[in-house]
Image (tube, rainbow, N blue to C red):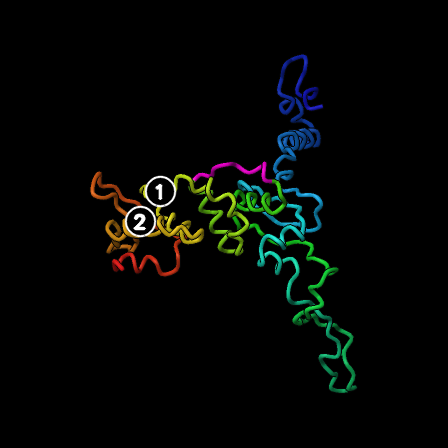
Amino acid sequence: MLKCLSTSSNNKDPLSATQSNPHQLIGLSFLRIMATKTPFTSSLFTFEPSDVRLKVTYKGEAIIAHVSSSAMSFASPVWQKFIFPPWKPVTAQNLATDENTGSAPNAKKIGIAEASPKDNEKGALPVEEIDFADDNGEALLILLRIAHLRFQDNPATLPYQTLLQVAVLCDQYQCVNLVRPWLPQWLADEETSSLQLGNESWLFIAWVFGRENVFRDLAFKMVKGTFVNPINKSIYMTSWPFPRRYNKVEDPMPDGILGKVILGI
């Protein structure tokens, strides 16, 4: 239909030909926008059978993911608490008494009560939607694919920044064991990549995934090459000994590690 609309005997842009009719102009513009929007992105985050929705941000686009509550719960104890909260909403009546009549008002108040063990037994209903919009979408997609057994869709290797974001989510959601079978592939170049200037957050990656040798070697290098800018108090890493280049050291980092690095501990 769009192709037909964009063809005329005078080879003119249909938008210019419809400027006298604003309704037709708006309709054509809407069709053009819809024609450029494909369901591909949403399909990436669709895992069937699904019973929970996730708000996700992927490459700047807000989308809704459809996931399995069972797969999510097995993958992460934190996700399990999100999906089957250890608390439950309760409707409380008679929380206040009318001073004149001594009777409770009709209004209901919603409170939070701690769930009993029976509430988490088989048969409990999951929440309908969870907000993951603040998480890195690429890293989250990798974890969701593994959780839903879509192993073939994940890349064999990960670039540094993606690997870092995966480590952030694994630490945040306590699901390192979920990705452990993939670590030999993802960390294959750890000895060289971790020592490159600008890759100082390999210290966090090594800490999350238990790579003791990588952690030790990079920490030792940072002890020798890290300094504090006296003006803005930022921490910088310098190439050592030559050529002399600098890179600002930023989070994520293991808690308290930068102070120890600066002190040479």
Left or right placement of residue 209 versus residue 192 in this view:
right
Number of other residues with Cα within 10 Å of mark 1, as a class: few under 14, some 14 to 19, many 20 or more: some
Span highlighted in magenta in the image: 151-159
Q: Residue at label 2?
A: 217
Residue toward you, 253 or 118? 118
**Is 155 within the magenta?**
yes
Q: Residue at x 74, y 83 (%)?
A: 97
Point out residue 245 in the picture as x, y percentages from the top left corner: 25, 41
Please state which amino acid type lies under the numbered disc 1. Answer: Glu
The residue labelled by disc 1 is 191
The percent coordinates of residue 181 (x first, y second) are: 52, 45
Mark with earlier residue (1, 2): 1
Characterize the magenta stretch by its predominant secondary structure. Answer: loop
256 vs 40, left or right, is: left
User: Tag 2's secondary structure?
Assistant: helix
Which of 264 and 228 lies nearest the eye of the viewer? 264
Secondary structure of the residue carrying tag 1 is helix
Q: Amino acid at mark 2?
A: Asp
Vertically, is 166 above or below 174? Answer: above
Quadrant location of residue 20? top right
Q: Determine contact: label 1, label 2, CB under 8 Å.
A: yes
What's the residue at 31%, 52% (across, down)? 219
Residue 122 occupies quadrant: bottom right
161 left or right of 66?
left
- Quadrant where the C terminus is found in the figure: bottom left
